[in-house]
Image: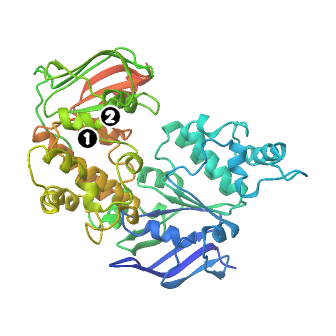
């Protein structure tokens, strides 16, 4: 009897102009947590789609419980006990928790109507197994992000899944929520005989939660089913990117007594921000740090006119400005915004790579040039697309056909090419692989050295301490601390967390 619940042997998958998987292998032990790692475009998403019946391989075989399988649809894979929890939520927000959990098999009464009492009773059983104190009648949109994530897992369990594929499961979670999730995963493995495939770019989490690791690089195995105890971060990074990790640190001399380029003075908002005061110097990287729910992203959206400012002033070069929208910010004031939700807010998925990467270039250059063509836009965006190593057959490729990581890179590239004076960057490296993260850090520092002023929001403490010149700490929609960054991790992290927990 094999120790493996799932085996993929010598898998090859071809797309026009691209070999996404090249003789790749993956083996998942029963009752284990197995990390599937690799850069964006390494083949992870393709492998998951083969496991879940979205794609069929061109070559190779898939075995489930020692029996060869070929799934023609995600439903077939689900019926065989395989479920995936995607990075983007798949719950129906206007439905109740119970309706979401029982959606594929909603119980009916004698009249053929949905039996809501049974829905609540059956869904409560799965919530109890996960020790979740959630009323099944709660509407999903009323849940926290963390509870939505846990309900996704409960939904998978309600399908009696024995294999869970988790794609970046902690990307929107606070440290405490992550800790709770990991405790749950360990309990599911031990008590419910579940086996888990764990996809993440957060290597510290891989070492904390996983038993084995498989690494893909350019569609091939860089390592296969390696015991996590045999590896350290340095070895794992080298397997993923083919070289040692480079740690980038911003080294600039900012005179904090200089005139400010951007000033927020006594800002109060509809969302609950109270008396926010902060300033941004020319060429500075100003970090906004806080736990999930601190109000950082919401503040930037208020500045950009997406939510209402009740009182206070925004000054640009000592002159008050009123920003109506992100478009207004870009065209009138040369302020750009790399949003956290780049897929939803940053891309036109059914347009091609050039249209997406060049949209901000068109917006800026059309004011000063009477004639614009694709070659002018291409010359502006191509250096950034190349430096971020976007994997695409051509600039004519439709963006929805690219991997999630490469979509992220295009959304970032369009703003790097935009020529803004001020750039707001929200969680720049969520879902981005280690090598690209290093390149992106270099680009952010390079932009600031050339005079671009940057407000950086990140929940990644090492990233914040590497890049920021000054760090503003927020909690409960208020500024609770400000620190000039000396890039000493222990000192800075202690100071920042001290501000949060005062």
Residue 307, located in which quarter of the rendered image? top left
Is residue 114 rendered to the left or right of residue 86? right
Secondary structure of the residue carrying tag 1 is helix
Give the answer, above or below, for where 55 lies relative to 499.
below
Quarter placement of the N terminus = bottom right
The image position of residue 66, as x and y in percent, is: 66, 80
The residue that label 2 is drawn on is: 490
The image position of residue 240, as x and y in percent, is: 35, 65
Q: Residue at x 37, y 68 (%)?
A: 42
What label does residue 241 carry, if any? none
The residue that label 1 is drawn on is: 466
Q: CA distance from mark 2 to mark 1?
A: 12 Å
Question: Is the residue under label 1 in contact with that under label 2 (CB below 8 Å)?
Answer: no
Give the answer, above or below, for where 362 lies relative to 55.
above
Is residue 132 rendered to the left or right of residue 479? right
The image position of residue 17, as x and y in percent, is: 32, 79
Residue closer to the observer: 218 or 262:
262
Of marks 2 and 1, the one in the foreground: 1
Quarter placement of the C terminus = top left
Residue closer to the observer: 300 or 462:
300
The image position of residue 239, as x and y in percent, is: 35, 67
């Amino acid at each position: 009897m094999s120790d493996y619940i799932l085996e993929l042997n010598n898998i090859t998958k071809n797309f026009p102009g691209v070999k996404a998987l090249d003789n790749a292998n993956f083996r998942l032990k029963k009752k284990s947590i197995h990390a599937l790692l690799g850069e964006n475009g390494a083949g992870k998403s393709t492998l998951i789609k083969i496991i879940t019946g979205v794609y069929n391989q061109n070559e190779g075989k898939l075995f489930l419980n020692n029996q060869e399988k070929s799934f023609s649809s995600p439903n077939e894979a689900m019926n065989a006990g395989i479920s995936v929890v995607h990075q983007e939520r798949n719950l129906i927000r206007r439905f109740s928790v119970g309706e979401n959990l029982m959606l594929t098999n909603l119980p009916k009464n004698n009249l053929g109507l949905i039996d809501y009492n049974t829905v609540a009773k059956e869904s409560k059983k799965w919530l109890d197994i996960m020790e979740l104190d959630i009323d099944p009648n709660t509407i999903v949109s009323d849940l926290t992000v963390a509870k939505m994530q846990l309900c996704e897992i409960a939904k998978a369990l309600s399908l009696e899944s024995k294999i869970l594929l988790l794609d970046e499961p902690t990307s929107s979670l606070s440290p405490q929520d992550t800790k709770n999730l990991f405790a749950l995963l360990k309990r599911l493995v031990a008590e419910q005989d579940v086996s888990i495939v764990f996809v993440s770019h957060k290597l510290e989490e891989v070492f904390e939660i996983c038993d084995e690791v498989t690494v893909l690089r350019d569609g091939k195995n860089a390592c296969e089913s390696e015991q996590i105890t045999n590896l350290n971060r340095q070895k794992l990074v080298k397997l993923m990117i083919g070289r040692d990790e480079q740690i980038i640190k911003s080294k600039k001399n900012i005179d904090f007594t200089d005139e400010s380029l951007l000033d927020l003075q006594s800002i109060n908002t509809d969302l609950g921000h109270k008396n926010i005061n902060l300033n941004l110097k020319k060429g500075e990287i100003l970090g906004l740090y806080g736990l999930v729910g601190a109000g950082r992203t919401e503040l930037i959206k208020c500045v950009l006119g997406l939510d209402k400012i009740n009182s206070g002033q925004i000054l640009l070069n000592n002159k008050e400005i009123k920003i109506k929208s992100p478009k207004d910010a870009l065209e009138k004031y040369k302020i750009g915004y790399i949003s956290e939700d780049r897929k939803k807010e940053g891309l036109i998925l059914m347009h091609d790579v050039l249209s997406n990467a060049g949209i901000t270039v068109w917006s800026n250059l059309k004011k000063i040039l009477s004639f614009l063509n694709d070659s002018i836009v291409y010359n502006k965006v191509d250096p950034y697309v190349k430096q971020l190593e976007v994997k695409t057959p051509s600039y004519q490729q439709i963006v929805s056909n690219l991997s999630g990581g490469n979509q992220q890179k295009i959304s970032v590239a369009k703003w790097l090419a935009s020529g803004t004076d001020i750039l707001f960057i929200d969680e720049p490296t969520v879902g981005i692989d280690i090598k690209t993260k290093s390149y992106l850090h270099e680009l952010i520092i390079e932009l600031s050295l050339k005079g671009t002023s940057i407000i950086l929001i990140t929940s990644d403490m090492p990233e914040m301490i590497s890049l920021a010149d000054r760090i503003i700490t927020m909690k409960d929609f208020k500024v609770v601390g400000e620190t000039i960054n000396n890039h000493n991790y222990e000192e800075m992290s202690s100071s920042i967390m001290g501000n949060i927990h005062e």
